[in-house]
Amino acid sequence: MVADHDNDLVPSTTEGYKLGEKKSVDHYANLDAEDEALNRWKASLGIAQGGKANTIGDPNDDRKVVILKLSLEVTGRPDVVIDLTAKNALTELADKPFTIKEGAQYRMVVKFRVQHEVISGLRYLQKVTRKGVPVDKSDEMMGSFAPNTPQQQLYEKRFAPEEAPSGMLFRGHYEVLSRFMDDDKNLYLEFKWSFDIKKHWDEISTTTPISK
């Protein structure tokens, strides 16, 4: 569940919404085969009707959502890819800010795996601060996902492009808190990173944990 700090960075809720009971993927696979709407929903998640679900996952790893890679795609620049399976990747990410030229178009891409059970309402949440003052907060719905299978071994989510602000007032250093959570407010990953908005591009540091 959510840590005590930054309790304002949680998924938005709809009035009257009631959290559902967690069910296994095998349970969903064997639900009413005559319900066409339900079958379409199961098909959208890759859940086969009847029998035992053919899923992959590490039985020794109790995580239900495993974030594998984060990428920052910037127009006209090489992609920066953070391999979160690498040792100390999150620590290095927090210590080395990205540089984004003012006015540049960029987007984030995440690759991840789901295991053990269906995840409903997976979200990416982000809070940006500058000199300790919140300047932006976002809550991006990623969707609902069944555990991965041999046919689909991971998921990829490409977020909508964004544009870095321009002008002297917006240049400077920004701190970011990011979370992957679901509608039940289960926390799957939390990490901190930072970026600098500058008038010109700097060379990307070779010590940044990046890959192609």
Image (spheres, grey):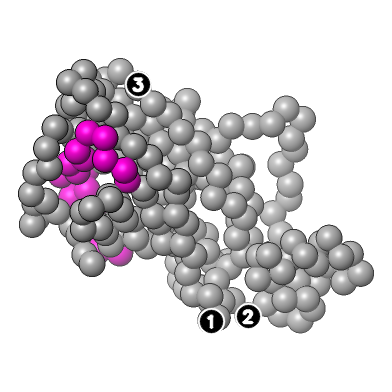
In the picture as drawn, the residue positioned furthest to the right comes out as 34
The residue lying at 17 percent from left, 21 percent from top is: 168
Q: Residues within 10 Å of mark 1 (few under 14, many from 20)?
A: few
The residue lying at 9 percent from left, 55 percent from top is: 207
**On the image, numbered disc 3 is attached to which residue?**
134
Q: Which residues are magenta?
A: 85-106
133 on left or right of 161: left
Q: Residue 159, image x and y in percent?
A: 45, 49
50 on left or right of 209: right
Q: Is residue 154 above or below residue 104?
A: below
Task: Give the spatial CA distance, label 1 vs label 2.
Answer: 8 Å
Q: Amino acid at mark 2?
A: Asn
Which mark identifies residue 54?
2
Q: Secondary structure at mark 1?
A: loop
Residue 132 belongs to magenta span: no
Q: Earlier in the sequence, mark 1 or mark 2?
A: 2
Q: Amino acid at mark 3?
A: Pro
Quadrant where the image shows the C terminus: bottom left
Task: Give the spatial CA distance, label 3 vs label 1.
Answer: 42 Å
Q: Secondary structure at mark 3?
A: strand
Q: Nearer the viewer, residue 159 or 166?
A: 166
Q: Residue 82, image x and y in percent?
A: 26, 57
The answer to whether mark 1 and mark 2 are in CB contact below 8 A is yes
Q: Nearer the viewer, residue 42 or 59?
A: 42
**On the image, numbered disc 1 is attached to which residue?**
150
Q: Residue 92, image x and y in percent?
A: 18, 50
Q: Earlier in the sequence, mark 3 or mark 2?
A: 2
